[in-house]
Image (cartoon, rainbow, N blue to C red):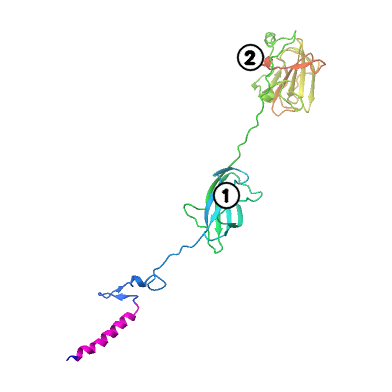
Amino acid sequence: MRSAPRAVLPVLTVAAFVWCATPATAEEDGSGGVQAPSVQLSGGSEYGVPAQTVKAQRPVASRLTLPVAAVSGNPPRLLLRIDEAGVGTVSVRVTVLNLATHRPAITVVMGWVHTGHTVVLGWPRGGTLSPGSYQVIVNARDHHGGTLLRSSRHRGVASLTITAPVKVQPKVAPPPPIPAPVTPPGVPTPAESVADGAVFPVAGPHNFGGPENIFGAPRDGYLHQGQDVLTAEGTPVLAPLAGTILTTSYQAAGAGYYAVEQTGVGFDFMFAHCQAGSLAVGTGQSVTAGQLLCKAGQTGDATAPHLDFEIWIGGWQAPGGYPINPLPYLEAWEHAGTAA
């Protein structure tokens, strides 16, 4: 009876050996299900070695410096630095993307750039940027094919706004003040001419224009000898005072169709740029104040309908004759006509 226990021992030993040699990828639990493998034997390339995550080495744009805004033309100065531990050079390309067209405006292939050094980007000759919004995008690749790592801190992307240049208007010296007219002896003043019944020479809406229309304004090689009265084409032009027509003629490169009147009070009047075919008087004809002479036009050297009115002392274009500023007389006659 004592020999029975000795027969059981070898069987138990074999059973234990078989259990240890069986792979433990799964076990049944007491309910008939499958248990997960033990922690020691899962997740690694070897049983008993835990899994490890190895981060790939990649280049980083640690510096990308340029203005946020610039004037159109040549791109602004751009500073760039690429870092990657253990790597001496990386291949770099910089693209300026037009956000309106989503097309590259400029692309610069920098080639292999040393890491760890700030470099100044050399823009291509003739590469310009027009006004608009752009993105400057850096791309880099190392010798192992690793591309630029983009993080919240180092994205390798910058925004750039290009604006149109501000046009600086050249400073124009104001025209010198017109001296008060000196009325020669025997010539009526503006007020005296009004008392003599002078009439404003333009019978319709008008104005005196700007600095380029005044007496003494610069012209091509000479000074303006009259005062422009801007008005509509065909507005009647009248004789301010009674007198005699000295001449009527045509000057293609200057006065166009014109008439000259001589008065008995020391004035000669010239009326220039009359409308073609509108001259209503002839040489030697006597006229009264307010009589129609012609109609306003833009013949000759003129760009808009107007009357170029001149007042001469001592004879129109005569030896010793000279023009005076007619504006004080025109303003006096205009005021008198309005008051009437």
Circle 2 sits on which residue? 335
Q: As shown in the figure, which amino acid type bears the numbered disc 1?
A: Leu
Q: Does residue 138 sit above or below 192 in this rendering?
A: below
Asked if residue 99 shows in the view, the reply is no
Label 2: how many Cα within 10 Å (few below 14, some 14–19, many 20+): few
Circle 1 sits on which residue? 79
Give the image quarter of residue 282.
top right
Report the residue at 53% width, 49% height from top. 158
Q: Main secondary structure of the magenta part?
A: helix
Report the residue at 35% width, 71% height from top. 40
In depth, the one of 134 and 46 nearer the eye is: 46
Q: Secondary structure beneath disc 2? A: helix
Quadrant where the C terminus sits is top right
| Residue 87, x across and y down, in percent | 55, 60
Report the residue at 26% width, 87% height from top. 10
Q: As shown in the figure, which amino acid type bears the numbered disc 2?
A: His
> What are the residue bounds of the magenta stretch?
3-23
Q: Is residue 134 left or right of residue 53?
A: right
- What is the number of callouts on the image? 2
| Residue 244, x across and y down, in percent | 78, 13
